[in-house]
Amino acid sequence: MYNCDWFSFTADFDNYDRELNFRLHQMFVILDFERVKPNEDRFVDFGLFKFEVLNHGSRSYYYILHNEDMQIKIAQFRSRSATSFPIYVHFKSQFLWSSLYGVSSLMDKFLLVIEWLEEVLGCGYIGSKISRLDLCYHTDDVPEDFNADDFVGRHTSDDTRRSHRRLSGVNIGSRKSQKIYLRCYDKYLESRATKKQWFFDIWFNAGMNIRKIWNIEFQLDREYFDEIKIAGKKIDSAESTIKGMASIWFYLTNDWITYRIPDKDRRTRWQISPWWIQLSVFNGDTGHLLIRHKQKNLPVLDALAPGFVGYLSAIAARTDSELLDGSLLQRVYKLIEDYENKNGKDFEKMVLKKKQLLDPEQKKDDESSEE
C-alpha cells in the first residue's frame, strides 16, 4: 500500500501586501486579535477549515495555524529573497490518508487548498516549491530475516532498533548528512504509541495483517530537490513533485538502494529480493482511505481516560458524591455551569470548536442539521 505520509511546500501569491490588499489586512487583524487570547480561545474559522492559532511564530513566519489536517505558516511581509515564499503548508497524515469534501487524490487536495488560500488571502497563486516529501509503502510481508546488512546502495550509514529483543526498526542514511533518509519500522507499534489506531481500519479494509504492518518510508528534504534530477528533469514545485512520484519512487528503489539476498561473495552481485522487486513497482493509489469519523473512536479516549478518571475521583472525594447514584455527574455539571458563568464560556461551543479542528466536514454537517 503506497502513499505520501508528509507533504509540505511553500507557496507564492501576488498582491501580498497588507497596505494594498484589504482582505489580507483583515486576515492579519483577525490573527493578531486571536494570538493574544488564552490558549483555549485562539480559534479562527476561514470557511473550509477551522484552525487553532499558535502564538510562537518566527520572524520568517509570524503566524502559525494548526488543526488535525494541516499546519499553515504565514509571513507578515513578502521576503526580499525571490526564493522565499510567504506561505508554508504542511499536509499531515490524517489529511493525506483520508478524503475530504469528496476529494481524495493528493493533486486534488493540493488544488483545493490553493483555491481556498486565494480566497482567504485575496491573492492570486503564482507558484510553489516543495519543502519535504515522505513517500511510504505499508506492507505485512517483510522478510523474516529482515536486517540492515542486506541493503545495498549509496548510503554511508545505518542503524537498527530493537524492542523487547525484537527488531522494530532499520534506518538507512542520516537525517543530517544525507539528502535521502530511509526509515523501515514496525508501523503497528508506532501507530499504537502515537494514538493513530485509525490506520487499523485502513489496513483491515485492504486485507492486511494489522499486527505485521511495517512502513518503508523515504524522507526527501528540500536539499534533495535542489540537486537531484529525475529522468533528466528537475523537480521543484509541489505540482511537479506530485506528478513525478512514480519516477521518484523508481529512482529510490532501483538506483539509490535495493534490498538483496546475500547469495554470492560480492555484495553488488547479490540477487535483488523478490519482496523488494514487488515494492519497487509504484502504485500511488492506496484504494483504501480513512473514514473520517473513525478519529473519534475509543483508542484516543483510552489515552484521555487516566486523567479523566483521576479528576473525577478527586471531585468525588472532595464532594462526597457517588458515580453510581448520579450525584457525581450532577456535581460535574454544576462545576461546568459555574465555570461558564464565571468566565463567560460556552461548553457546547468549546466542544464544537474541537470537533471542527478534528474534522472540517463536521462544520458542514452541523450547519445542514441546523437548517
Image: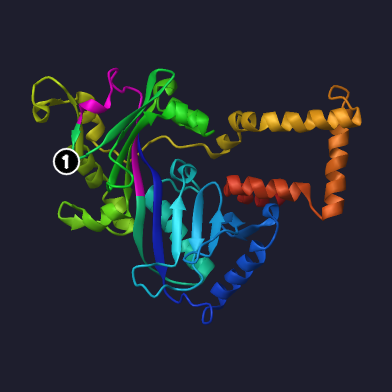
- Within-10-Å neighbours for mark 1: few <14, some 14–19, many 20+: few
Residue 231 in the figure: left or right of residue 224: left
The structure residue drawn at horizontal position 58% and vertical position 46%, both measured from the top left corner, is 359
Residue 150 falls within the magenta-colored stretch: yes
Residue 299 coordinates in the image, percent (x, y): 59, 29
| Left or right, residue 197 beside residue 42 | left
In this rendering, the answer to whether 64 lies above or below 97 is: below
Mark 1 lies on a secondary structure that is helix
Does residue 98 show up?
A: yes
In the depicted view, which residue is nearer to us: 271 or 161? 161
Count of all numbered marks drawn on residues in the image: 1
- The residue positioned 44% from the left and 18% from the top of the image is 164
Q: Which residue is mark 1?
A: 255
Colour scheme of the picture: rainbow
* Residue 164 against residue 220 in the figure, above or below: above
**In the image, what residue occupies the spot 8% across and 26% down?**
266
Q: In the rendered view of the protein, which quadrant contains the N terminus?
A: top left
State the residue in front, 309 or 67: 309
Q: Residue furthest right?
A: 320
Q: Quadrant of residue 219?
A: top left
Q: Amino acid at mark 1?
A: Asp
The answer to whether residue 325 is magenta is: no
Q: Closer to the camera, 194 or 293?
A: 194
- Could you tell whether 86 is left or right of 313 in the image? left
Residue at x-position 37% and y-position 37%: 286
Q: Position of residue 76 (x, y in %)?
A: 51, 71
Location of residue 234 with respect to 214 vertically, above or below: below
Residue 148, picture quadrant: top left
Q: What x and y, as percent, mark residue 225?
A: 27, 55
Residue 205 appears in view: no
Magenta range is 133-151
